[in-house]
Amino acid sequence: MRVVIAPDKFKGSLTAVEAAEAIARGVHDVLPDAEVTQCPVADGGEGTLDVLLAAGGKRVDLRVTGPLSQQVDAWYVVLDGTAYLESARACGIEYVEPSPEVALAAHTYGVGELVGHAIAGGARRVVLTVGGTASTDGGSGMLRALGAVLLDREERPFEFGGGPLGAVVTVDLTAVREQLGDVDVRVATDVTNPLLGPDGAAAVFGPQKGAGPREVEVLEMSLRAWADALQRAGAVPVGDVPSAGAGGGVSGGAMAALNARAESGFAMVAELTGVADALPGAELAITGEGSLDRQSLSGKAPAGIAAMAREHGAAVLAVAGRVALEPEELAAAGIAGSRALIDHAESLEHAQREAFPLLRAQSAELVREWLTTRA
């Protein structure tokens, strides 16, 4: 039997690569002769670089400016001449303790340092993944690191961060465009939120970063001022563009000033890791992630794997840290069965601490159940 293993990360417990290995061992516990292909995937958020590294990429390490201007260790991956950068490596929410003050002050300057380093190193294509940021600065910090000049009404520079950004009146992108040259920039995300409005970066993602109602209002006004200033500078209008709000608007900044195009993070990683080539002829595909919930059905790895597997007639099973979907909802997404680690652990802490053996054991049990049903 041919089995394809294609999980995303189990956040806080296992990388996608580690999860794939645990599931594969569980499959072999039940089907020792099975032909198993491991294709760990990601959706363009945190963990994407780990998957690309496993696919043969080269790691490049450097220190950059963190979301509160502290120095942080970051890295990106070069694969086939393309530099893949995670915004979260420079300004990830793990570098801060979310609070109203942090929500206004966090910035993306380090992301621009990553982009500049990759271009200086010879990359002719840059793919920027934008999930997991602490910032809501519209990518303004990133562009300042690349040479953009932002001035207030009195033609003075001002502090970094989404809060101070409301002072912006003029933007000079000359140095950015000179440095960029003909480098192709893409943003990998499956988030479709625009930059502005009730579904925008401030309203939807600001509270996750510590913003209360007042801070959300400030950040919304700042992003609106930023979008207007960019447009006056000759950049592409991005206020209402789908996906411009991803990563606290860093996606929108890249679209406006770097001529970036948004593409599906899951589709990009799936192509690079070979899962599309592995599925034809497979009888079973097993996917999973930390939390299998309604978000999983909207552009996340489990739904993507299920859709791809259905095209090739493979059954799909899912193992997750927790499952918050009814069997009917899973079936509608093409997932024939699921198991949750938390249902077989003493506590959440136990499930996270013992994620690898639990994932192996529950994968084996899930395959046994599927084989019985199939028979």
Image: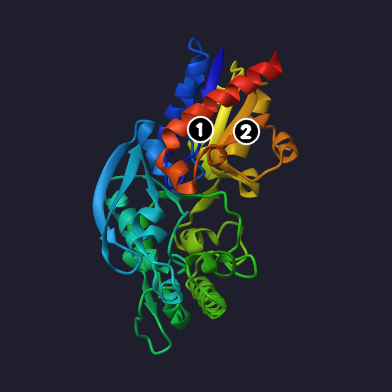
* Image quadrant assignment for residue 197: bottom right
Which residue is drawn at the image coordinates 52% and 31% (left, top)?
A: 6
Depth order, front residue of 157/189: 189
* Image quadrant assignment for residue 307: top right
Horizontal and vertical percent for residue 371? 64, 17
The answer to whether 43 is drawn above or below residue 147 in the figure is: above
Q: Of the numbered discs in the image, which one, if any, rests on residue 200?
A: none
Depth order, front residue of 317/235: 317
Q: Amino acid at mark 2?
A: Ser
* Label 1 Cα neighbours within 10 Å, binned few <14 / some 14-19 / many ≥20: few
Whole-number angstrom distance, CA of label 2 to CA of label 1: 25 Å
Q: Is residue 359 left or right of residue 122?
A: right
Residue designated by label 1: 271
Q: Of the numbered discs in the image, which one, if any, rests on residue 338?
A: 2
* Label 2 Cα neighbours within 10 Å, binned few <14 / some 14-19 / many ≥20: many
Which residue is drawn at the image coordinates 53% and 29% (left, top)?
A: 362
